[in-house]
Amino acid sequence: MRRKAWHAWLPQTFLVLSILLLALHETRVLAPVERALQIVLAPLQRGMTEVVRGVGDLFQTVREVRELREEVTALREQVDALTIENIRLREFEAEATQLRALLGFVQANPTWAYLGADVVGRSACVNVPCADVVGQEPNPYIRTLTINAGEAEGVRVGMPVVTGGAVLVGRVARVSLHTSQVQLITDPGSSIAAILQQTRATGLVVGQPDGSLRMVYIPQEDEVPVGDVVLTSGLGGAFPRGLVLGQVLQVIRQDFALFQEAVVHPAVDYRRVEWVLVITSFQPFVQEEPTE
């Protein structure tokens, strides 16, 4: 009962004390006490202020970090999208460059007939059966290209195949209904009548097992400068005249041999050929017989 009575008088006691303290404050009686309390409580007040400010800064920092993370994520997505777009544009540029070269070749030879095709496969075995290699590295030298045009599209065995810049790739070796195999000029079974662009020396360009080319049967008296461009001569009628085969890298000459030879670097990397033109019809080079 006494505890309940004391609790009942407690609010009134606080009210009286509050009124009394307010009256003393107004009469400036408590001024010395208040100044003393301010001196004592000021450091605590500043400490609490710093704590409150630090907590506020912490929440602000957390919010800013969250916003920065969201911004970084958005920027990364934009960078990824721009990177993909840049790759696509570069691919389109590479395609356009190759197609412009093919178009330029067509425009330079308007009387010939052509069939465009994509390279869909590459192989290193044309003269021997293919098999899976499980214990050693496969043959790195490409011998054939497979294109997505065949008998149904008008492709026939023996037709020349070129890529951009009038570069001879090879000739059609096998034909299926909608695909064909192109024997590259670097294949050891390939031989093409050739002529040097500058000196007009003639010979026969044959493929080598190492994937290079060699021009053989060049007369000893003919000049063969390193760097000269090797072209098809058109003799024999199998290929048009003036197609690019490669460039002379080295001349092999022996004093007592009937002919000299030249190592020829192919004009194109066959691993990177993507589009080709099959020449379905052309005007063969006819060598005029000397008049008596």
Image (cartoon, rainbow, N blue to C red):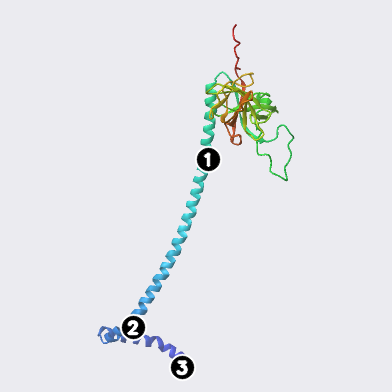
Residue 177 position in % (x across, y down): 70, 28
The vertical placement of 235 against 49, above or below, is above
Between residue 37 and residue 62, name the one nearer to us. Answer: 62
The vertical placement of 115 against 26, above or below, is above
Q: Nearer the viewer, mark 1 or mark 2?
A: 1
Between residue 259 and residue 24, name the one nearer to us. Answer: 259
Give me the residue at 52% from left, 32% from top.
97
The vertical placement of 283 against 142, above or below, is above
Q: Earlier in the sequence, mark 1 or mark 3?
A: 3
The vertical placement of 46 against 98, above or below, is below
For mark 3, give the secondary structure: helix
For disc 2, the marked residue is: 40
Indicate which disc residue 65 carries: none
Q: Is residue 130 left or right of residue 241?
A: right
For disc 3, the marked residue is: 2
Given the image, on which type of amino acid does mark 2 rest?
Val
For disc 1, the marked residue is: 88
For mark 1, give the secondary structure: helix
Residue 56 position in % (x across, y down): 41, 68
Mark 2, Cα crowd under 10 Å, few <14 / some 14-19 / many 20+, is few
Give me the residue at 33% from left, 79% from top.
42
Residue 256 position in % (x across, y down): 63, 25
C-alpha distance separating marks 3 and 2 = 37 Å
Number of on-image labels: 3
Given the image, on which type of amino acid does mark 3 rest?
Arg
